[in-house]
Image (tube, rainbow, N blue to C red):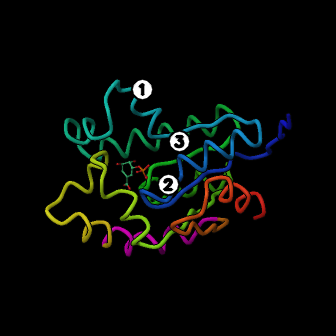
Amino acid sequence: RQVFDLHKTVVLVGMMGAGKTAVGRALAARLGVPFLDSDSEIESAANMTIPEIFERDGEPFFRAKESQVIGRLLDEKKGILSTGGGAFLSEENRTMISDRGVSVWLCADLEVLWNRVRHKDTRPLLRTPDPYATLRDLYEARVPLYAQADLVVNSDGDTAIEDMVDRVLEK
Ligand code: S3P
């Protein structure tokens, strides 16, 4: 089995529902490198789910934890790092990620993202009276920031995970 010698951590960024976790896990398995996930690290360190953290401590607290965790994961080991959809928004995080990793924006249409997130209740930011409008507003505000990633990989609604892995590797 191939074990890839990564020189930098590959950091997957992009909207909720873009497939960062699924593609990241499959990419790490394909390369035989560690899979790292900032949201799960935050959850296990706090022993709470993301919605619970947002509810109890608020979004600014979550964002501070997120920056700390990403910094620590980038220091600890090289691998594939899936981040939460808001991780690439702060300049501090973008700088940290570009200095110590290669960023890949998993880009998908709003409708594709919506179809993937609409039936789940795991995204505190979408607990609004009109979650579609909220997702659209986040999408529009965030695209220019995600576009600063080193690489862009498009995810269509029906692209299989392993095909997404191929596309990332081609880039
Ligand atoms: C967020 C996305 C979530 C999670 C949190 C905030 C965001 O991660 O970090 O709910 O700001 O877009 P996913 O992108 O994995 O859903």
Query: Start and end of the magenta stretch?
Result: 137-149
Type of amino acid under label 2: Glu
**Whether the residue under disc 2 has CB within 8 Å of ligand 1:** no
Q: Which residue is mark 2?
A: 92
Label 1 to label 3, Cα distance in Å? 14 Å
Residue type beneath disc 1: Ser
Q: Is residue 146 inside the magenta stretch? A: yes
| Position of the N terminus by quadrant | top right
Look at the numbered discs 2 and 3 and tell me whether their residues touch, using CB distance below 8 Å: no
User: Dividing the picture into quarters, in which one does residue 132 lie?
Assistant: bottom left
Instruction: Quote the CA–CA distance across marks 2 and 3.
Output: 11 Å
Graded by Cα atoms within 10 Å as few (under 14), some (14 to 19) or many (20 or more), the crowding at tag 3 reads: many
Amino acid type of the residue tagged 3 in the rendering: Ile
Disc with the residue nearer the chain's start (2 vs 3): 3
Q: Residue at x 44, y 57 (%)?
A: 17
First-in-chain label (2 vs 1): 1
Residue 98 appears left or right of 125: right
Answer left or right for 133 relative to 44. Answer: left
Disc number lying in front (2 or 1): 1
Secondary structure of residue under mark 1: helix
Q: CA distance from mark 2 to mark 1?
A: 24 Å
Mark 1 highlights which residue? 44
Q: How many marks?
A: 3
Where residue 159 sits, quadrant-wise, is bottom right
Residue 87, image x and y in percent?
46, 53
Q: Is residue 8 left or right of residue 74?
A: right
Residue 2 position within the rendered picture, expressed as x and y whole percent measured from the top left: 86, 38
Circle 2 residues within 10 Å: few <14, some 14–19, many ≥20: few
